[in-house]
Amino acid sequence: MAESSGAERRPRVRLLGKADCHLCDDARTVIAEVCAELGVAWTEDDLGGSPDELARWWDKIPVTLVDGEVHNYWRLDPTRLRTALTRPPRR
């Protein structure tokens, strides 16, 4: 699991991906840039180590979660992510 520090302790953004996934690489770049800009913490989980999770998300990888809820599948729009992160976190 990769993790980035931000102004917040609990990561608001979680990337679910797998090795050798070009869309995961693209999503990681967008998340890193937007989260750095906004000072938001994020984390990444490689689903390759979890057969159950990989089976659950296989056809949607990469999956981006914001505040524990699915935000996006496949290609990630930085403007949409930025908008979601400028709203208060859901509790």
Image (cartoon, rainbow, N blue to C red):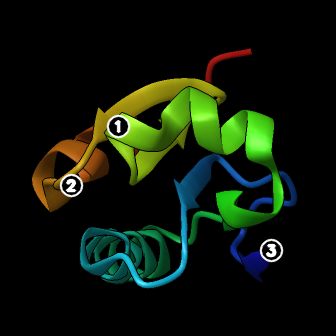
For this view, does 13 lie left or right of residue 38? right
Residue 50 lies, in percent from the top left, at 81, 51
Position of the C terminus, as image quadrant, is top right
For this view, does 15 lie left or right of residue 51? left
- In the figure, residue 42 lies in which quadrant? bottom right
Q: Which one is in front in this view, the residue at disc 1 or the one at disc 2?
A: 1
Residue 33 lies, in percent from the top left, at 35, 82
Circle 1 residue: 59
The residues tagged by marks 3 and 2 sit, at their Cα atoms, a distance apart of 20 Å
Q: Which one is in front in this view, the residue at disc 3 or the one at disc 1?
A: 1
Judged from the image, the secondary structure of the residue bearing numbered disc 3 is: loop
Q: Nearer the viewer, residue 55 or 31?
A: 55
Q: Residue at x 66, y 28 (%)?
A: 68
Q: Residue at x 37, y 71 (%)?
A: 24
Dot 2 surroundings within 10 Å: few (below 14), some, or many (20 or more)? many
Tell me which amino acid carries mark 2.
Leu
The correct choice, above or below, for 82 with respect to 2 in the image is above
Position of the N terminus, as image quadrant, is bottom right
For this view, does 6 lie left or right of residue 16? right
The correct choice, above or below, for 91 with respect to 77 in the image is above
Residue 35 lies, in percent from the top left, at 47, 70
Dot 1 surroundings within 10 Å: few (below 14), some, or many (20 or more)? few
Judged from the image, the secondary structure of the residue bearing numbered disc 2 is: loop
Circle 2 residue: 76
Circle 3 residue: 1
